[in-house]
Amino acid sequence: MMDMPFSLPRRRLLAAALSSLPLALALPGCSSKAEPLPFEGNDITGSQLGRDLDMIDTTGQRRTLADFRGKVLLVFFGYTQCPDVCPTAMAQAAQALQLLGDKAGEVRVIMVSVDPARDTPEILGAYVQAFDPSFVGLTGTPEQLDKTARSFKAFYAKEPGPTPEHYAMNHSSAFYLMDREGEARALLGPSLTPEDMAHDIKLLL
């Protein structure tokens, strides 16, 4: 099934929005006791993003942030029929885990589907595990997705195609790096290399 790729202007618009996100999150009253760290990505410590994660994994089990406590998380919003951004991001995450060596087991890469109508648990599971067997796919109802995306302040929007079944999903293209306590710590944009990603992950291990 073919999909409509993102145009270059749209990618630039999304990248610009992501680059300004940490400034928008610097709201009064958002403080954290977490130690400042020299991230390659944008520091979002104290933003409290992602606390309302509530989706369904590829086995049909409900998953919340508490289920991943003790692991460092890389959370990405995407979908399986994405033509370029998502497979590139997943491949980069897989490379970053390889760079971590024995420490890779302390990290979970999570892809939250922004296309639950087409991304069933079976389809999503096969997709993410093709990049790495440890990757976790989360899907669910439109209501669950809306709640979770709002919690992360993640953008997604349906873009109509030539038929009702052939459509694209525009979406944020950064990873949210979260520490072992489930606190959002850095936003890793698409310009970062796997080496940069591994560097930031190591800071939390």
Image: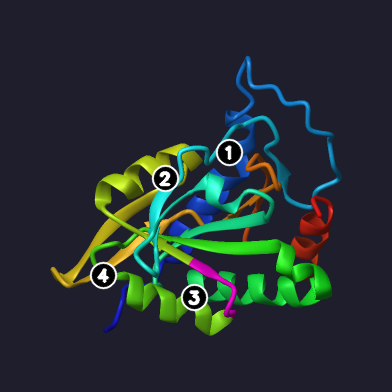
Which residue is at a point 49% across and 52% down the rendered structure image? 14
Q: Which residues are magenta?
A: 132-136
The answer to which of 95 and 137 lies nearer the viewer is: 137
- Helix or strand or loop: what does disc 1 sit on? helix
Depicted 29 relative to depicted 192: above or below: above
User: Could you say where residue 114 lies in the image, as x and y percent from the top left?
Assistant: 36, 58
- Helix or strand or loop: what does disc 4 sit on? loop
Is 13 covered by the magenta stretch?
Answer: no
Disc on the earlier residue, 3 or 4: 4
Which residue is at a point 74% across and 70% down the rendered structure image? 104
Identity, as a three-letter code, of the amino acid under mark 3: Val
Identity, as a three-letter code, of the amino acid under mark 1: Leu
Depicted 96 relative to depicted 51: above or below: below
Position of 76 with respect to 123 (left or right) is right
- Helix or strand or loop: what does disc 3 sit on? helix
The residue to which callout 1 is attached is: 21
Mark number displayed over residue 149: 2
Select label 1 or label 2 by which is in front: 2
Disc on the earlier residue, 2 or 4: 4
Mark number displayed over residue 118: 4
Q: CA distance from mark 1 to mark 3?
A: 26 Å
Identity, as a three-letter code, of the amino acid under mark 2: Ala
Disc 1 packing (10 Å; few <14; some 14–19; many ≥20): some
Identity, as a three-letter code, of the amino acid under mark 4: Arg
Which residue is at a point 59% across and 32% down the rendered structure image? 48
The residue to which callout 3 is attached is: 128
Q: Residue furthest top?
A: 28
- Helix or strand or loop: what does disc 2 sit on? helix
